[in-house]
Amino acid sequence: MHTLTVNLADRSYPILIGSGLLKQQGALDAYLPSDDVLVVSNESIAPLYLHGLTELLGDRRVATAILADGEQHKTLATLESVLNRLVAAGFNRDCTVIGLGGGVVGDVAGLAAGVYQRGVNFIQVPTTLLAQVDSSVGGKTAVNHPQGKNLIGVFHQPSCVLADTQTLDSLPDRELAAGLAEVVKYGLIMDAEFFDWLEANADKLIARDAESLELAIRKSCATKAAVVAADEREQGQRALLNLGHTFGHAIERCLGYGEWLHGEAVAAGMCMAAGLSERIGWLEAGSAARIAAVLASMGLPVQPPAIDAKALYQAMTLDKKVIAGEIRLVLLKGIGEAIVTADYPEAELRTELDASLAAA
C-alpha cells in the first residue's frame, strides 16, 4: 500500500493506494468516529464490492443507498434520496457516509455528507480510474442542474480516500479510457516529463498493465494533492485542474448528461483548448496534434460531437470560472505549462469552436 497525504492542517487526510485494500481488515477503522455508516453506491458497483466493504466495516450499523447508474442521475432528486436514507436510519452528526463507486457516486455521497446536519464524516472508496485519480481527491462535491454541470455543491473534504486498484479489473474499457483523460491532464498542466511517459506507455495503460496503472494513479494523486493543499477553494492554481473542462462540461450539457462519459468530453475539450492555444501562438506548432494523438491512442475522442456552435458557446458561459461575463479558460503555454486566463481574442475562441465542430 502506498500512502499520500493531502496537507490541510488539522483536516489533512491520507490517500491509500494499493491492490486488495477492500480485503484488508481494519483499513478504515481509524477514520470511523462511530458505528453508524451509510454506504452510497450504485446498481453496477454494489453487486461487485458492497459485500466486501461491509465485511471490512465489521459489526457497525450499516445502511445503504443504492443509486441508479449514470451521470443523468446526478441530480437534486438523487441527493434527496440519500438524505432521506440518512434520516430514516436515524443517524446523527457522528455518522459516516462512504461513497463506493465512481465520480457520480462520490460527488452525491460527498454532497450529502456535506449538508446533512451541517456536515458529517465522509470517506471516498473510488472504484473507477477517473475517480481514483481525480474526483475522489480534493473535497469537491456537487450535483448537476439542467442548465449546467456541478452548479450545486459544497467543498467537503473526506477523512480518507481508499483506492483499491483491484477494482479496476471490472472496469469497462470505455470507462478506463475516460479515466486516462484525467491522467493526461496532469501531464499537460504541469509535468511535461509525465506527459512524455504517458505518450510512451499508452499501450501498457490501455492493456491494464498493473504496474503502469498504479504508477499513473500515484503520480496523478500526488499532483492533485499538492494542488489542493496549496489552493483548497480554487481561488488560483487549483483552477488549472479544469483543463478542457469548460469545453467538456458544455459538451455534456448540450448532448444530455450521460451520452458521453465525463472523461470523453474532457478529452475533446483538452484538444479544443490545445487548438486555441496553438491558434493564438502560445503553444508550439504541432503540439495540439501531438496531444490529440496521445488521447486517440487511448481510445478517446479528439473532436467534439456534431452539435451547434452557438449552443456550445452559450453552455460555456455557465461555467463556474466565468467572472463578470468573461469565459476564463485553462490554456497551454506549452506541454507541462498551463494558465487560467480570459486574455485571448474571443473571435479566436469562436473560430476554434467552428473549426472543431466542422471536423466532427
Image (cartoon, rainbow, N blue to C red):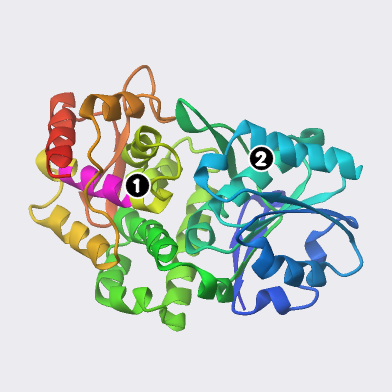
Label 2: which residue? 111
Q: Which residues are magenta?
A: 265-275
Which residue is rendered at x = 53% and y = 57% of the image? 131
Location of residue 100 with respect to 108 vertically, above or below: below
Left or right relative to 260: residue 281: left
> Which percent across, then down, holds residue 151?
52, 30
Choose between 191 and 200: the one closer to the eye: 200
> Which percent across, then down, holds residue 176?
42, 65
Query: Residue flagged by tag 1: what amino acid is it?
Result: Ala
Question: Quarter of the image holding residue 117?
Answer: top right
What SS does tag 2 mark? helix
Location of residue 212 with respect to 250 vertically, above or below: below
> Which percent across, then down, holds residue 180?
38, 63
Chain-order first, disc 2 or disc 1? 2
What SS does tag 1 mark? helix
Left or right relative to 17: residue 312: left
Query: Residue flagged by tag 2: what amino acid is it?
Result: Leu
Is the residue marked by circle 1 packed among few (<14), some (14-19), or many (20+) residues within 10 Å? many
